Amino acid sequence: MLEALLEITGLTKAYPGVVANNDVSFTINKGEVHALLGENGAGKSTLVKMIYGLVNPDAGSMKLNGASFVPESPNRARASGVAMVFQHFSLFDALSVAENIALGMDNAPPPKALAKSIEMVSQAYGLPLEPKRIVGTLSAGERQRVEIIRCLLQNPKLLIMDEPTSVLTPQEVEILFQTLRQLKAEGTSILYISHKLEEIRALCDTATILRHGEKVATCIPASTTARDMAEMMVGASFLNPIKAQREIGEVLLQVDNLSSQSAEAFGTSLRAISFELKAGEILGIGGVAGNGQDELLAALSGEMRTGSETVRLKNRAIGTLGPNRRRELGLLSAPEERLGHAAAPGMSLKENSVVTAARRMGLLKSGFINWNATDQFTQQVIADFDVRTPSTHTPAGSLSGGNLQKFVVGREVSQQPEVLVINQPTWGVDAAAAASIRQKLLDLADNGAGVIVISQDLDELLEISDYFCALNEGELSATYLTADLELDQVGLMMGGSHGAGQEAAQ
Amino acid sequence: MNLLGIDPVLLIASLMVSATPILLAAIGETVVEKSGVLNLGVEGMMIVGAVVGFITAVNTENPLLGFVTAAIAGALLSTIFATLVLYFKSNQVATGLGLTLVGLGVSALLGKPYEGIKSPTIKAFEIPLLSDIPVLGPMLFSHDLMVYISILIVALVWYTLKYTRVGLVLRAVGENHDAAHALGYKVIRIRFMAIMFGGGCAGLGGAYISLARVPQWTEGMTTGAGWIALAIVVFASWRPLRTLVGAYLFGGITVLQLNLQAAGVAIPVEYLSMSPFLITIAVLVIISARGNQGAPASLGRLFHASS
């Protein structure tokens, strides 16, 4: 019964200085949901890009339906029945849904016929979409539908999905899984890339696990524990962060009726956001990407000024103060984008320390930089946060994502902030480093600071936050004790595809 | 019907002539920018087109051949820019400025022996029947061929961008080059062709100045038309039909101020001469206050085809 659709034998791809894939072999059967599991940098993306014809392998071969398969370009791969939904959507914001779909097809029918087939497919799979909408105005879930429909219109034999759920609410994930199960029942094979173990256990028939570019194991997810799969991915066991009982102190930060107009064309405007943060508290702010996270961070860090009274730190109005003044007063922040926003890639770690820690750590002496003190401070961050770097002179851009993130978090935490706002603290960081970063944030709160963690990783928020709320189209939901929350409720707060974050409040 | 001694029929007719070089350059640059590349070398490509077209026309006595070689020269010059920017990933702004300087220098060198000569001009092409209409006939339908060709190019660009697959792919590349690459479109090749089209149009525009508007060669005779064309692309929010409006508006101001000078209006000549540029600046300030509406999202960004 089990017939092989795609056989991969010994695929190898090396980039200067790094072997992305080394002798990877596995087989995807017809009508199978096959998981490709691994940490960031394990080589999952490179592998699927080879299958989709975006990257040509250095060695190895592939067979599709028993015949040799050498995709030289995505067009060739599509012609052979391989379709792909990308992690960072390959969509064009300023174009309409129909135009976006036409761009992903090799023989796009005329607009009217296309609109009709879009409607047909979207009804058949329960994925409602209006062909005329401009993609920039769609939610993340709807944007993913555009990609999926684009693939389905070509009747793929193999559908590759690269981290499809990282931007979806739990409800949207459920709809996606229904679609995928329906496709599977129709005989389509799915290669499902993810590092979310519970999802893989719920959906996938087989899992291939990659580590450092090599295949380390194949397993049946349903009969393997998440813990075991995680350790296969990481190759070692690691500690989960420990949450201590904490004293909750007085109110540190008050945000009252904060609104803003986004400067970006397809950005999100903040709408009447209010919340309070007490000492020793971790407030988790969830939400699907692009619902105002960057804007909220900018409003709190001081990059974006708002009305004076909208942000109060220890009862002092700071809404019109800039980032430097806020840092002096004890409100520190670390934005999501490590390279270029949280750190200057071309500058050394030492120089990057000066950028945010100059005033608070006294690294300036009558306008000149005190390099000795800076070096000491940087050394201390490197030691305390286990940043793997040859020296303090190393350019920030040459560190791996996890190490740079540890440095960025460490630089802020080491300045003993009273309030720390951090966006996506563990984005693209391996599991061990993520666990250690989370532990540091917990420690910071233990010592009496208030911490705001903005994240799209729900598991992370549920793990470390005391209170939870969610951003949805620039609006902040009511705040709840994290311990009392049900997953369904979280989904509704995030404005799941069936709308109405308000219902959760009852 | 005369206002301040200005004949409106003549004014509109000369407005179309005066706007044609800017229109040609602007429509070419619209295509380039729609593909996500900012080429500030329009002025340089125009003046090279002007001198090459002039030289060809003088030597062959065939102005139409002059236009053809001018377009080829503009396109060839733009391949230097395209190669540097697309393959060697050089900075688009700096490279474009460099292209303008090179164009001005090269044209001065090539044109030296041709100063003071008059070129053969293209004859007016009176559209049968339409040109016989009173008032409208001499105003709109009695121009030379290039005026109609420039309008035709605008219409073609508009139609192509809006309704054809080629246009859709071009817009997609300018909107998000990484996504276009991921879908398998050849970003570099598409941009290269767009840049060459822009160069060809700029060359035609330049040649129209030296062969039709002022049928002779003077060093630096484009006098900033390329910069005005760049401004009009922004003014038009990257839309072809609005480019037509923009070019005719600025052409109109230029002609009007010349007419006002001739009519001896009591405004110092210097102010009148600078008025088209002042108005360009004013309009751009007003437009940029509204935000960069319609700008291709990848405009000016470097594209690295990293797998």
Image: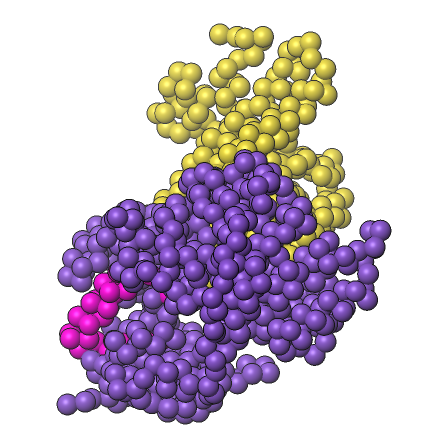
Chain colours: A purple, B yellow
- Residue B71 visible in this rendered orientation of the protein: no
Task: Tell me, yes or no, whether the highlighted magenta stretch contains residue A208.
Answer: no
Residue A279 screen position, x and y as percent: 53, 54
Query: Could you tell me if residue A1 is visible in this image?
Result: yes
Residue bounds of the magenta highlight: A166-194
Q: Nearer the viewer, residue A232 or B279?
A: A232
Q: Report whether A468 appears left or right of B17.
A: left
Residue in the image at 60% along x and 55% along y: A418
Residue A390, percent from left and from top = 70, 79
Quarter of the rendering occupied by the N terminus of chain A: bottom left
Where residue B154 appears, x then y in whole percent? 44, 40
Vertical arrangement, residue A456 with respect to residue B209, above or below: below
Query: Camera-side residue: A462 or A110?
Result: A462
Q: Find residue B21 and report its image quarter.
A: top right
The front one of B17 and B90 is: B90
In magenta stretch: residue A167:
yes
Quadrant in the rendering for residue A417: bottom right
Whether residue B171 is situated above or below residue B267 in the rendered picture? below
Q: Relative to B277, does residue A364 appear above or below in the rendering? A: below
Q: At which x and y percent is residue B11?
A: 53, 19
Q: Residue at 76% across / 69% down in the picture? A: A376
Q: Which of the 4 quarters of the picture holds residue A196?
A: bottom left
Identify the residue at horizontal 46%, vertical 56% (top origin): A283
Picture residue at 45% right of the left edge, 46% below the top: A275
